[in-house]
Image: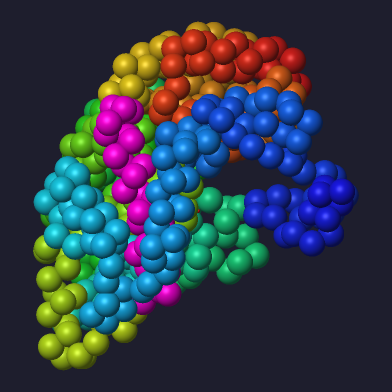
């Protein structure tokens, strides 16, 4: 059977490897709209849009057609040296035009991890180019998620991605998660909490020496760590500290990009002014693996100037700007624009958040968080941390809704095409699962 061969041959990400050798996997066979179906035809509501990514829903024919057309015309070419091709140029131009703050150059990778890894390399390269070889430290946040490669995994602030991998490596530091509900002092307002978070960041930068700190990486809304929406003024306070000490801001928009928070980018939602933006996932609704790094001129220019000294920029991925991936991303962005999926996110969001608030009254729920069409219900722990979350995810699966448990938070991030009635259906299943999970 496919299950037996899966157990025999495939090592999965993010699983108890030993347990997977003996327990089966759920074999997903096809998808349509907000649903996926297993091999027996059982329907699941994809409450996490795959991995926070299938904005246009499953089974979108236009993306299949865009891939086929590009496969037939030019299935592969690279963008090394002076070679290029139409889809990569069109997508780079499109991203520069869409960017909410002035950006001047785009570089493509195949995943969010690779993109963040490369941004770290670029920050180091840039500091060297500027004659500041000491300015190399990178600050991430506890519960931040930026991927799993050596540098991206080091920016990530989650123990499960560090333990036994010898991460984080040197030069990587972490400041607090802006988890207002758990970390606010008694009586502290959101604005005061944000000020305190910024002052903790300032203390860290001063302790390390501002001349050694290159960049701060942050997701506008933290996703994979459990969905943490920044409190009032958080980004304004953080940015003021970064500016004061000449520390770059990298907005990791891998989840928030292309509409998730109700604007095209989370950067707009929170008034951020990043030097670099990283996008992936919803850029192609994950129909193809692709990510992009958007760089401001101030970030890019010193890197380019270094070519006078070194001749060649010594970096490149075989699949950078892959023609099929860029063609699919372009068509996907066209669909997002034509169907106004960002507007749909804004229009559906009040109902999404109202459903979440309603669940907040459930005795098993500690707190709920959300913005746009991304949210989480955090359950009261039962025994070890993570047990209640895992039980909830299992009960949800039985009810026919796929979400994601992170610790005791159950995360939801449905496709941006979702309708009001589909939202009601998803939350009815989640409520049933909540009642029976233990
Ligand atoms: N950054 C963020 C904010 C993410 O959510 C993710 C993946 O979930 C990544 C980076 C890593 O992307 P990938 O899994 O494509 O390497």
Q: Position of residue 438 (x, y in %)?
A: 76, 22
Q: Is 162 on the left-hand or right-hand side of 283?
A: right
Q: Position of residue 199 (x, y in %)?
A: 26, 45
Look at the image and give the residue range highlighted in magenta. Answer: 316-342
Pick the front one: 242 or 228: 228
Whether residue 166 is situated above or below residue 380 in the rendered picture: below
Judge whether residue 317 is colored magenta.
yes
Measuring 65% from the left and 65% from the top, which residue is drawn there? 164
**Magenta span: chief secondary structure:** helix
Judge whether residue 281 is colored magenta.
no
The answer to whether residue 84 shows anywhere in this view is yes
Q: Is 146 on the left-hand or right-hand side of 269?
A: right
What's the image's color scheme? rainbow
The answer to whether residue 193 shows anywhere in this view is no
Measuring 42% from the left and 34% from the top, which residue is drawn there? 56
**Quadrant position of residue 407:** top right
Measuring 59% from the left and 34% from the top, which residue is drawn there? 31
Q: Position of residue 243 (x, y in %)?
A: 14, 54
Measuring 28% from the left and 67% from the top, which residue is drawn there? 85
Pick the front one: 185 or 157: 157
**Quadrant position of residue 165:** bottom right
Whether residue 163 is situated above or below residue 224 in the rendered picture: below
Whether residue 279 is situated above or below residue 385 in the rendered picture: below
Pick the front one: 140 or 99: 99
**Quadrant position of residue 323:** bottom left
Pick the front one: 185 or 172: 172
Q: Is 125 on the left-hand or right-hand side of 3?
A: left
Q: Position of residue 119 (x, y in %)?
A: 32, 65
């Amino acid at each position: 059977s496919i299950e037996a061969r899966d157990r025999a041959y495939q090592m999965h990400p993010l699983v108890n490897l030993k347990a997977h050798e003996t327990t089966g996997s759920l074999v997903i066979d096809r998808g349509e709209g907000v649903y996926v179906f297993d091999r027996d035809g059982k329907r699941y509501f994809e409450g996490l849009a795959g991995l926070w990514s299938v904005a246009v829903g499953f089974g979108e024919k236009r993306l299949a057609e865009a891939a086929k057309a590009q496969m037939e015309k030019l299935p592969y070419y690279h963008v090394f040296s002076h070679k290029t091709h139409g889809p990569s140029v069109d997508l780079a131009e499109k991203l520069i035009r869409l960017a909410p703050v002035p950006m001047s150059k785009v570089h493509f990778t195949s995943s969010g991890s690779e993109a963040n890894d490369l941004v770290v390399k670029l920050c180091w390269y840039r500091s060297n180019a500027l004659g500041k070889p000491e300015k190399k430290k990178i600050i991430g946040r506890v519960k931040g998620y930026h991927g799993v490669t050596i540098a991206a995994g080091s920016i990530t602030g989650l123990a499960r991605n560090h333990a036994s991998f010898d991460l984080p490596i040197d030069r990587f530091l972490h400041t607090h998660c802006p988890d207002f509900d758990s970390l606010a002092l008694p009586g502290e307002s959101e604005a005061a909490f944000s000020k305190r978070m910024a002052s903790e960041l300032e203390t860290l930068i001063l302790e390390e020496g501002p001349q050694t700190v290159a960049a701060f990486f942050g997701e506008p809304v933290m996703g994979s760590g459990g969905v943490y929406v920044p409190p009032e003024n958080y980004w304004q306070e953080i940015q003021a500290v970064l500016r004061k000490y000449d520390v770059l801001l990298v907005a990791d928009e891998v989840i928030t990009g292309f509409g998730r928070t109700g604007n095209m980018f989370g950067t707009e939602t929170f008034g951020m002014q990043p030097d670099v933006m990283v996008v992936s996932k919803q850029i192609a609704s994950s129909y193809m693996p692709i990510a992009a790094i958007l760089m401001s001129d101030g970030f890019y220019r010193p890197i380019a100037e270094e070519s006078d000294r070194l001749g060649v920029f010594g970096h490149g991925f075989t699949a950078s700007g892959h023609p099929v991936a860029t063609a699919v991303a372009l068509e996907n962005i066209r669909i997002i624009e034509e169907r106004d999926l960002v507007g749909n996110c804004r229009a559906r969001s009040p109902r999404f958040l109202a459903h979440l608030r309603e669940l907040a009254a459930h005795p098993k729920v500690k707190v709920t968080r959300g913005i746009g069409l991304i949210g989480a219900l955090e359950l009261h722990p039962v025994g070890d941390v993570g047990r209640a979350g895992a039980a909830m995810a299992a009960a949800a699966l039985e009810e026919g809704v796929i979400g994601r448990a992170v610790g005791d938070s159950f995360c939801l991030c449905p496709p941006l095409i979702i309708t009001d009635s589909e939202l009601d259906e998803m939350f009815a299943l989640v409520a049933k699962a909540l009642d029976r999970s233990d």
